[in-house]
Image (cartoon, rainbow, N blue to C red):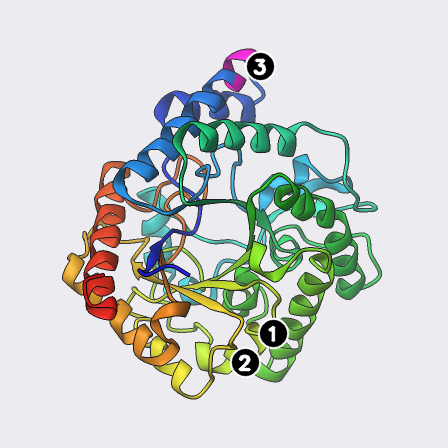
Amino acid sequence: MADRILTTHVGSLPRPAYLLERMRAQAAGETIDPAGLAADLVKSVNDVVARQVSIGIDLVSDGEYSKPSYATYIVERLTGFGGESRGDAAADLRAFPEFAQQQVKIGAVVPRAGGACCQGPVAAKANDGLPTDIANMKAAVDANRPVGAFINAASPGVVAVFQKNEFYPSEDAYIEAVAEALRPEYEAIVEAGFDVQLDSPDLAMSRHLTYSDLDEQSFLRIVDRNVEALNHATRNIPADRMRMHLCWGNYAGPHHFDIPFAVIAARVLKARPQMILMEGANPRHGHDWAVFRDVPLPEDKILAPGVIDSTSNYVEDPEFVAERLLRYADVVGRDRLAAGSDCGFSTFSGVPTVFPDIVWLKLASLVQGAALASKQLWGGR
């Protein structure tokens, strides 16, 4: 057991300009040099792991460098997807359309529940996406020796949020098919020696993005269904090899329609992954630590609240980071606490929510704040 608070983050990190240019060209259908892109990925993954280790991040990722986004990458790895659905914008942005339009103009992240559609049977297809991710991460981890490492993967529920069902007779059947199709990816990540992070914003964000027309009880049934699907898809993986990320949307909006954490907490905590990463730094969810007074963190869970905001260029003072961690330690205990970020710092490739150089200052502050909190909690050992 660690004698300090371990540090991590949610996964995505700003991609280097040379990699973004190749990814942009590929997405636009331009002719690219595959060997050049592969070499760029090897280099960039090694560099980002090395940088995380150098500033003191314990549990590192590959930055999600190979993926256009955390949820839409699956169309390259699963059969059955095509076409495009634009989808509705988040309810809080629909409430302020002029603000939403301004955000679009300045290139900010504006979430919309749209993407490719499910138009046929969903199943894993032959591709080199995951093997390449694993190989690149193995090389980077072997070279840089972090405390631990994880690779992100989309949850069944979030796939259904962004890739609408046009094939299966019900959304329940669609979720079941997606869960089984993603199971080999989850298992392969763990078999390769990494923890798998299940990105699950469907358990919170989809309330105001996809299901804003439902009453609360109907939405809670969706949460229960999606947790059950996630648990079934990960049935062969030990809980301590899994992390789950919960969020209300990684964008700088009013968020006044976010479903309160207190309403979904007990249901979310039924998910199998041991580590739960959730928002805890932004103004809408900075108070959610108090929920654990009434909804105890299960004994087999580790909580990694966000102690740095992923949508603001403010660099949190390490003292403030420590203060946030100490609040959580009061309610869940020091031994079941890690330090994380609210969300990723480049949810969509080429659209960083925080200026790239500032991201690293924020992560350094996270590390410094965790050290301050650890000194108080363990008495300087």
Is residue 133 depicted above or below 216 in this figure?
Answer: above
Question: Which residue: 81% across, 52% down?
Answer: 167
Left or right: 8 in relation to 34: left
Q: Residues within 10 Å of mark 2 (few under 14, many from 20)?
A: some
Local SS, label 2: helix
Of mark 3 and mark 2, the one earlier in the sequence is 3
Observer able to see residue 31? no
The residue that mark 2 highlights is 266
In the picture, which quadrant includes the N terminus? bottom left
Q: Is residue 247 left or right of residue 163?
A: left
Give the left or right position of residue 165, taking residue 29 as reference: right
Please tell me whether mark 1 or mark 3 is closer to you in this view: 1
- Secondary structure at badge 1 equals loop
Part of the protein shown in magenta: 34-38
Q: Quadrant of residue 170?
A: bottom right
Q: Please tell me whether residue 86 is drawn above or below residue 282 in the rendered image.
A: above
The tag on residue 34 is 3
| Mark 1 and mark 2 residues within 8 Å of each other at the beta carbon | yes
Dot 3 surroundings within 10 Å: few (below 14), some, or many (20 or more)?
A: few
- The residue closer to the viewer here, 251 or 190, is 190
Q: Amino acid at mark 2?
A: Ala
Q: Nearer the viewer, residue 152 or 218?
A: 152
Dominant secondary structure (helix, strand or loop) of the stretch shown in magenta: helix
- The disc at residue 285 is none
Reading the image, the residue beneath label 1 is 270
Q: Amino acid at mark 3?
A: Pro
- Tag 1: Cα neighbours inside 10 Å, few (<14), some, or many (≥20)? few
| x, y percent for residue 137 | 51, 32
Report if residue 40 lies within the magenta region. Answer: no
